[in-house]
Structure formats: structure tokens, C-alpha cells
Image (tube, rainbow, N blue to C red):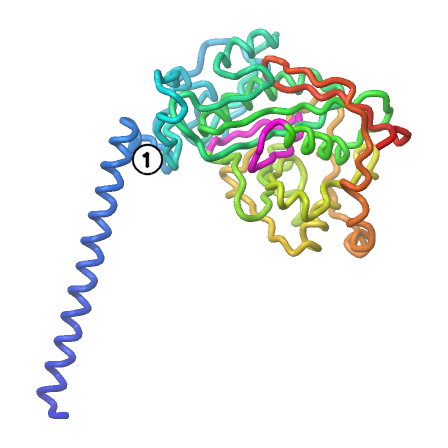
Amino acid sequence: MPPRFDSRVRLRVSRMEQQRGLLLLFLGVQLLLVGMFLYQNHRGQGFTSFLRFLIQAKPEEAEGLPFLAQVASAGLPSWDVYSNLSQIHPMDLSDEDLPNCPAISPYINGPLKVMIPENLTMEQVVEKNPLVELGGQYWPPDCWTHHHTAVVVPYYGQARHLQHLLFHLHPFLQRQQLHYGIYVVNQVNSTAFNRGKLRNVGFWEAMQDEDWDCVFFHDVNLLPEDDRNLYICDIFPAHVAVAIDKFNYKLPYRGYLGGVFALRPIHYLRINGFPSTHWGWGREDDDIAARLKLSGMPLLRPHLLFGRYHMLEEGPDPSQEQSPPSPGLQALIRHKWRPNGTDLLDYRLLSKELQPLYTNLTVDISPSVPG
């Protein structure tokens, strides 16, 4: 090939590559502008909310109330969990005519202040959450959501913890524009706590109410500190309480799976639910971590900045167990995890009460209870 011709070919190829790069850049800018326009057209404040999701604007001032607890992420601007929720209003439209909720909720702000008012009453929590329906369910009143999440809370008499959780968790979930319901599984007639069994009960009772596509299992003493920690399920199970203040906002050990984690119903069935044989503050979380590994499902976790939680300190603390499991635990679980779970789910539902902020399931899970 003549040198001049070879040079022209290289020059032409170089120009074509430059033009292709410019064309791709132009198309990318066009798509971004069209997306911004459509998003703003769907939500007047959509682009502002998107920017706020990435970079934090100056937070609104919280109400001047005396607070029993006040926690905020150090060095980060933070918001009152109830800020801007007054902008949510029902629309005079049928459910079929409601627009779809945007991919990113305009009410998400990022870091949140954990502020619990002194002498808080359940009536005050109800008053702060007027759109929550009987039984603790909530649907976004101004858009149609594709996310349906049940929150299951094992409970063993921690009344103040439950009150504080409901005060903080309801607005936290409303900010994310989810359809959600909160189920509190209340254990009676037994001296030893069995968190795994209560989680199993909560799952099965919740699934009888709604076709939930995601179930969050939530300790009663943990309050989320960032609303970018989305309470929705992905294609794999997720452990979201990755940065608890009690543990200096880091995992106590690599395989830690305590606090708050999410499963789709298919994930739950694949691991055969939760172990039912751990009485007291045992190793059920390490058991679950081993089940996930044995079933071949990866575990997802959010960024440490998003998965931040404040731990309420008073009363029994199920998260005290923070030492790594023994090396032989997985080998032991390998031989017994399939028959130890939903197959051993024997309980008696004593009552199911639709409270203003949650569904209360009172159960007897004593070993002598017939299945």
C-alpha cells in the first residue's frame, strides 16, 4: 500500500472516530436533557430532588421541641425526618388515573436527624402520620408505586423502643414513596425470646394480607439515619444495617448480618425461612448468613454512608452479639438448615389487631404449641 494512501486512510479513520465520539456525546446530552424535561414535567421539583439526592442542600430547621434523643451524622448536613412531608396531598383521581411514582422520590434528602421528642405518646405519633391507614399500611396518595414492602418487627415488651421506631420509621418510608405495612410480632407465654420464630410468623401472616414483593426484617431498636437507604428488594437478599453507631459505623465483623435485612418471598423460601431453635439472644443471624451462602445467593449491602443506624440503648440489646461465629458453624448448619425453619413453624395466633400505626400479631410460640 503506498505511504500516501496509508496516511489518508489513517487520517480518515481518525476523523471518523472523532465524529463518532462527538455524535455519542451529542446524543448523550440530548437524552439527558429530554430526561430532565420529562422528569420535571412529571414532577415540578424533580430535578431539584435529583440533585439533592446526590449533593446535600442546606437542611431545613427542625421544630423547636425538647428531644429525648438527637443524633445526626457528623460533618454532614441533615434533615428532620418529617421535613417536607406536608407537601404530600391526596389527588382527586382514581387509583387507575394516578401517575406512576418517579424512579427517585422527590422527598428523599439524604442524611436524617434522629430526634425523639421527650414524653412522646402514641397519640402524637398517630397525629404526625395522618395518611397511615389502620393496621399501619400506607399508599402514596399522589402516585402509583411499584414497590410493596412489609416490615416485620419481632417484639418482646420493648414498648418505648417500639414507640420511637414508629415515630421515626413511618415518615422515613413515606419519603421513599412506597406502599408498606408494619407488622409487630408480639411474643407471649414464653420466658425465652425466639427472634427467628417470630420472623417466620411475621412473614407468613403478612403474606396472607398482601402480595408483598419485599419483606424487611427489622430490629425494634434501630433507627435509620439516611433515606437513601431504600427499603425495596433487589434480585438478591440485602443486609442494610451496615453502619450502626454503637459499632462506630462499621461492621463488627465481616459476616455480620444483624439488625435489618431484606428478602423477597422467593429468597425466604429458598433458605427455608429462619431457624426456630435459637432461644434467647442467640446466633440466629449467623445461621441466616450461613443459609444464604449454602443456598448460593450473594448478599448485597448499601454504601456505608447510606446504611447508617442509631441504636436505642435501653432494655435488652439483641445486637450485643458482635463476635464472629465459630469456624465450624457453617458445617453444622449444612446438615440441619433444610429441616430447621418453616418446617418447624408451630405457633398459635392469639390475636391480630389493626392498630393505627401497625398490625399487632400476638402469638404463642412455646415448644408445646401444636402446629
In percent of width and height, residue 222 lies at 62, 28
Residue at position x 79%, y 42% in the image? 343
Which quadrant of the structure image shows residue 311? top right
In percent of width and height, residue 238 lies at 58, 43
Q: Image quadrant for the C terminus?
A: top right
Q: Which residue is mark 1?
A: 51
Instruction: Report if residue 47 lies within the magenta region.
Output: no
Q: Return the residue found at the far bottom.
A: 1
In percent of width and height, residue 329 lies at 79, 52
Q: Is residue 32 left or right of residue 56?
A: left
Determine whether the residue tagged by mark 1 lies in a helix, strand or loop: helix
The magenta span reads 209-227
Residue at position x 38%, y 16% in the image? 89
Which quadrant of the structure image shows residue 6? bottom left
Q: Amino acid at mark 1?
A: Leu
In percent of width and height, residue 163 lies at 63, 16
Which quadrant of the structure image shows residue 190? top right
Q: From the viewer's perspective, is residue 81 above or below residue 37?
A: above
